[in-house]
Amino acid sequence: MSVHLHWFLPTGGDGRTLVDRHAYTDGGIRRDRITPVSGVRAPDIEYLAQIAKAAEQLGFEAVLTPTGTWCEDAWLTTVALTQVTERLKFLVAFRPGVISPVLAAQMAATYQRISRGRLLLNVVTGGDSTEQKRFGDHLDHDRRYARTDEFLQVVRGVWGGQPFDFQGEHYQVEGGLTALPPDPLPQIFFGGSSAAAGPVAARNADVYLTWGEPPEQVKQKVDWIRGLAEKEGRTVRFGIRLHTISRDSSKEAWATAGRLLDDLDADTVAAAQQALGKSESVGQQRMLALHGGSRDKLEISPNLWAGVGLVRGGAGTALVGSHAEVANRIEEYHALGVEHFVLSGYPHLEEAYWFGEGVRPELAARGLLDAGPSPLAGVPAANGRPASAPGGAPLLVAGGR
């Protein structure tokens, strides 16, 4: 079982600080309305293309694109980026409650033809009722997961190439059909930590995705989902969502984490924690419990730092350390059965190079990656680092708050 490395497209904005939606007046979509925070970058297509091209060159298999009010639309953004990349796959996040499952199946089929088979799907049931209501979805938490279960049954059914009927609580389909099914069928990534989510993953997911908890907690999740899948007669693979801060030395990495933390004032952290505390997501509550809103003891497991989660919803932990130390932690999760690593870092362009040039060779040397030439083979070195890095070495100085 090889390690699959994926990166992240910050379609809600990026920067040299732990920015999130609170850093913008409008999600960063319009340059002239960005709140004046130093080092913040709008998610325009030119910048996202830089990240996508870098991820492809550095050997990442795919990039995850988020979904939500403050993000550019994942389907439209990524299909545009397929035209400036050749091999990179796109892990498109979407909410099943706001689109017809038959239409989603048709969109996926079209996407596969346009991209020549480079679509992966990340099904996001949603853990924030306020966000869901913005899109006209008023179901409660558990009923959203029940609907997701039906949604995925319909999607797989209409991919079969024959008229498909379905009668459920949430969907009633007569003769549903994708005239030209996608080839290959997109892998379905799915996450959820609640009792309602587990059976949905076991019945429908190809890859169960968890946020970056300490190894023992991740092992418990893997065992839980694996057991449920076995009862369904299925095999589910596993992935983890983490940030990274990887440097040539551990001291440099932790200094960078410290600078990111120094940018966050007490009011910003308190406001973010209050908002995140209202989430119905069990996974989000588990993330918050790792640090309790405190800046103290943020290294919750060796090289696992919970500082990101002080202000960012969703994935709130980062692997911090030297390239070898970060590789050690990836190897540790891999030994638990985790195959897919969906990674990110601030800023996403520079951190992609730090990881790709530093950690990826470590993993390859340990035999954890598929054999093949290095994605940077033949690129001449300059000042001790590949000349492919934008502007030489990645920018280290954190700015903003």
Image: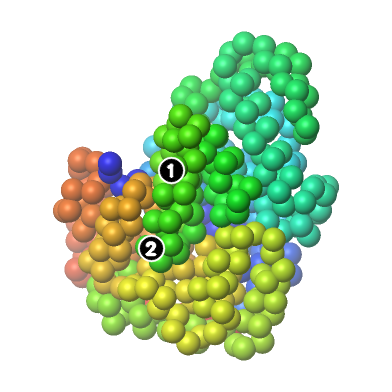
Colour logic: rainbow
Query: Could you tell me residue 314's position as x and y percent?
Result: 57, 62
Q: On screen, 182 above or below 219?
A: above
Distance in Å between CA atoms under marks 2 and 1: 15 Å
Quarter holding the C terminus is bottom right
The one nearer the camera, 325 or 145, is 145
- Callout 2: helix, strand or loop? helix
Q: Residue tagged by mark 2?
A: 216
341 relative to 314, above or below: above
Q: Which residue is mark 1?
A: 226
Q: Residue at x 50, y 32 (%)?
A: 232
Dot 2 amino acid type = Glu
Q: Nearer the viewer, residue 186 or 53?
A: 186
Which residue is more in the foreground, 93 or 164?
164
Residue 108, image x and y in percent? 59, 30
Tell me where residue 182 appears, x and y as whole percent: 53, 23
Near mark 2 (Cα within 10 A), the count class, few <14, some 14-19 or many ≥20, is few
Query: Is 41 placed left or right of 104 in the picture?
Result: left
Mark 1 or mark 2, which is nearer the start of the sequence? Answer: 2
Say if 330 sits above or below 277 in the image. Answer: above
Determine the residue located farthest toward the top in the rendered image: 162
Can you give x and y, in whole percent of width and height, for residue 363 in the image? 23, 55
For the point 25% across and 63% down, the residue is 328
Residue 125, visible in the rendered structure: yes
Q: Secondary structure at mark 1?
A: helix
Q: Amino acid at mark 1?
A: Arg
Q: Nearer the viewer, residue 119 or 283?
A: 283
Number of numbered markers: 2
Q: Residue at x 34, y 73 (%)?
A: 303
